[in-house]
Image: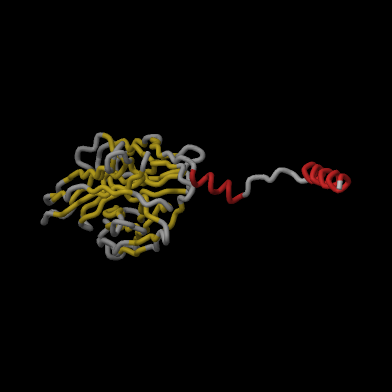
Amino acid sequence: MKYLRTAALTTTAMLATVLPVAAPSAWAEDRATFNAPRTVTQQPGHPLVLFPRRQGTVVAYCPQGTKPTGGGATVETDPVSAVYLTESMPVDGNRWRVRVYNSSDEVHTVHPRVVCTTDPTITYQAGPDQPIQPGESAEYSTADCGSQYTVGGGGQAGSMTFLSMLDVPGTPMARRWNARAKYTVYDPDAPLSYVRAHVSCSDSQPAYGFSRVLKLAPGAVGTVRAECPAGRVPTGGGASGSPVVLFNESGPTDTGWEVRATNTDFDAERNLFATVMCTAP
């Protein structure tokens, strides 16, 4: 009996010496990453001095370890709102790019801004190109998050084609994103333009905020603001309304989303309203 006990103890000691301590599994590491605290920040980009009748591009970058969910740009010293958005979208998972056109004879300054998150579940999807005839507005392009939730988005359009919708098509539990634009070249022989939706998706469902509906008189410029619920911060946003209400600015504030647009219809009143998607900071 003493021999058997000694042998058992010896065997146990050998196993303890030979077998390594188990390393954390990949599943445990993934779970720790998923459950880690998430932060949301906003980062400005370098401003662009935009000369008359020129197109320009501005970019705002996210810090390493974060991804963009939403973004946009504001225009300094633009009393007549002569600068229009042709593109506002995530690029390569680390920045937000905005393309604008200055239709005036004045110089304007464009300031980009991006919303960045440490959420590890962020993915990006693009919708199909929706063709646009000269002088027309497109049926919207739709990007789909599948089983994930829409937390932001943007759009991309061709030359002289200005965005008029960047918005979720339905809440709650929105899983898609729409983009629409108007092609402002009226030559019937001009080539087709296009618009394409881009959406930022997450496993986490956002909260939503909505602006009032603003009625814009013919030729008028107006601003709408959607605010997040108390204690939340914006991840993305946009606006919708008439196809002829074209965006001059769209971007995050500290607590919501703001869009400025021009009613290019000189005969009728048109609507504009904003939407914001929000999360805990």
x and y, in percent, of residue 90 in the image: 42, 48
How many numbered badges does the structure rendering display? 0
Where is residue 240 drawn, in percent x and y?
24, 54
Q: Is residue 176 above or below residue 217?
A: below
| Position above or below: 266 against 98 | below
Judged left or right of residue 137, residue 112 is right
Q: Nearer the viewer, residue 48 or 16?
A: 16
Along the horizontal axis of the image, is 55 left or right of 122? Answer: left
Q: State whether residue 154 appears in this view.
A: yes
Q: Nearer the viewer, residue 238 or 180?
A: 238
Relative image position of residue 204 (x, y in whole percent): 40, 51
Of 67 and 3, the residue lying toward us:
3
Name the residue: 44% across, 41% down: 38
**Horizontal and vertical percent position of residue 260:** 23, 44
Relative to 195, is 102 above or below? above
Left or right of residue 184, residue 1 in this image: right
